[in-house]
Amino acid sequence: MIDLRRLEALVALHRTGSVSAAAAALHYGQPTISHHLRRLEAETGAVLLQRVGRGVRLTPEGLLLARRGEEVLGLLGRAEAELAAATSLQAGRVRLAAFPSGAATLVPDALALLATRHPGIDLELTEAEPPEAYELLRAGNVDLALTFAYPDQPEPDQITSVPVLDDPLHLVERAGADTPVDTPVDLGALAEDDWIAGCERCRRELLALCADAGFTPAIAFASDDYVAVQSLVAAGLGVTVLPGLVLRAHQHPGVASRRLAAHRRVQLSTYGAPPRPAAVDAVAAALGEVALRTA
């Protein structure tokens, strides 16, 4: 393994033409530069310098190593500059996964906030429901995920999640029903209705809510697309339960909603334990602030 300090001495000699000039350029004493050059020859097993009169010049092998050394030191300097920029939030790339309604509501406002506070951060967005988002985190394909969970759902292994918002659930019915929107919801009164189910996690929560009300819902249709679900409700084909962020992202004019005494937990998830890169923390802080304003 070549010592970078010795490589730096060889490159300085190549650039300046003499040991004394190289020492001055690196702010070392001349004996230190001579020592580094001798040690570099010993480490590489190559003759790198040739004495000419009172000075030295590089051999062909020394010239080859010096030129490669310039490339190596240049790349190292670039890496250090990029790392310093990312640490100071002047630059950085964060890969974020977010579930659809979160991507449509919380993420745009967080991006606007980041553009003002940290314009050098580049955010790459992938839309993914929580199970897929967790796998993306484990595989290292994303750095941060906006996910959700219901109260009875355990945290996946090796995933660390921080709650940022309690997203209330709503009963969604066809608009024009006689029931006022501020009337408390009695799910038991809808036991004979057809129901429309959403994604797998939401479907499990719907079944749990209906079980608490004393019945098993007759699921007539199921779709992961919340726009399609609302269109089915608007057409009079059933009723459903949807989270508040879904209705904030899109509410069909043909449906009406009533808030339930239940919610899902919106959270920021990462793989493993802190600390996290500064750019990831900045994105998480922006999403947390936007979620707090949404609550």
Image (cartoon, rainbow, N blue to C red):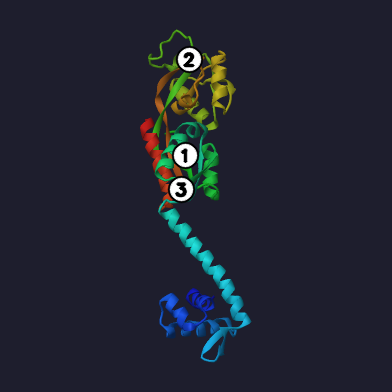
Q: Position of residue 23 (x, y in %)?
A: 44, 80
122 lies above or below 14:
above
* Marker disc for residue 278: none
> How many discs appear?
3
Q: Amino acid at mark 2?
A: Leu
Callout 2–callout 1 Cβ contact below 8 Å:
no
What secondary structure is found at the residue carrying circle 1? strand
Q: Position of residue 2 (x, y in %)?
A: 53, 76
Task: Specify which label sits upstream in the sequence, 1 or 3.
Answer: 3
Please name the residue shown 44% across and 37% down the image. 112
Quadrant location of the N terminus in the rendered image: bottom right
Left or right: where 117 falls relative to 228: left
Whether residue 104 can be seen here: yes
Q: Position of residue 70 (x, y in %)?
A: 55, 70
Left or right: where 289 falls relative to 50: left
Q: Which residue is mark 3?
A: 120
The 10 Å Cα crowd at callout 2, few under 14, some 14 to 19, many 20 or more, is: some
Q: Amino acid at mark 3?
A: Gly
Task: Specify which label sits upstream in the sequence, 2 or 1.
Answer: 1
Quadrant location of the C terminus in the rendered image: top left
Q: Which residue is mark 1?
A: 146
Q: Which residue is mark 2?
A: 190
Among the 4 quarters of the image, the one containing residue 30:
bottom left
